[in-house]
Image: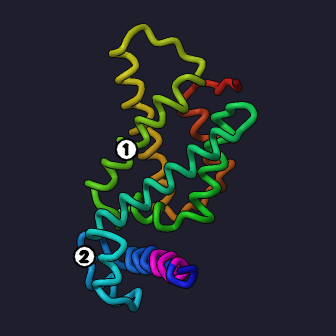
Amino acid sequence: MKKKDIRYYRTRKNIISAMTRLLRKNYFEQITVTTICEEAQISRSGFYLHYLDKYDLVESYLKEFIDYANEVFQKQKQKDIGAFLLYMLTHLKNEEELLSLLLSKHGSVEIQDKIKQIMRENARKNILPYLTLTLQNEIEERYTLAFLSNALLGTFQEWINSGQKETPEQMMQIIRRLIGYDFKKI
């Protein structure tokens, strides 16, 4: 049983690595389950043991990433949004190549819209309460969340598409200036 578990997780990791390699040179729409299987050197049945299709692969990956990000945020002794965003920018640059590629011009608009929706929900829960901003009503909250999620996603995409030349620290300073608000610590 233990060997099966190791093989199962190794195959999942191999599939993610294959998708990452394929996205480096192809657009998401050009990638098929067949090309993923060929790149990962696995059978189609091996792929379908883990995922329904390439969209399920991405959704599963995004869920794991969001769970990880929420766990990191919850472990902070002080809820410091600036420190959290800096950590996530660093993680995005150094560890999350697949996410970077999905956000890049190689990703799909459909997946980027899904990521934007995830960002909006996380901003509602994890960013909005810590901004030094007083919202008058639900309408202002809705538009503030739309602004934050679109602005952050667009900033991340520009950074990724231009080769991530700026350091995460430089990007954090840019984001702070663009948002125009200091983050408060809780």
| Left or right: residue 31 compared with residue 164 | left
| SS category of the residue bearing label 2 | helix
- The residue sitting at 28% across, 76% down in the picture is 31
Task: Determine if the magenta segment contains residue 164.
Answer: no
Q: Amino acid type of disc 1?
A: Lys
Tell me the magenta residue range: 5-12
Image height of 9 relative to 43, above or below: above
* Badge count: 2
Q: Residue furthest front?
A: 1
- The residue sitting at 62% across, 57% down in the picture is 91
Q: Which residue is mark 2?
A: 30
Pick whichever of labels 1 and 2 is earlier in the sequence: 2
Q: Quadrant of residue 84?
A: top right
| SS category of the residue bearing label 1 | helix
Dot 2 alpha-carbon crowd within 10 angstroms: few under 14, some 14 to 19, many 20 or more: few
| Left or right: residue 183 compared with residue 56 | right
Q: Residue furthest right?
A: 77
Image height of 121 relative to 95, above or below: above
Dot 1 alpha-carbon crowd within 10 angstroms: few under 14, some 14 to 19, many 20 or more: many
- The residue sitting at 68% across, 33% down in the picture is 80
Can you give x and y, in whole percent of width and height, for residue 88 in the image? 60, 50
Q: Amino acid type of disc 2?
A: Gln
Q: Nearer the viewer, residue 157 or 111?
A: 111
Can you give x and y, in whole percent of width and height, for residue 153 in the image? 43, 46
Give the quarter of the figure containing the C terminus: top right
Q: Which residue is mark 1?
A: 116
Q: Quadrant of residue 77?
A: top right
The main secondary structure of the magenta stretch is: helix
Q: Nearer the viewer, residue 170 or 100?
A: 100
Image height of 51 relative to 87, above or below: below
- The residue sitting at 47% across, 41% down in the picture is 152
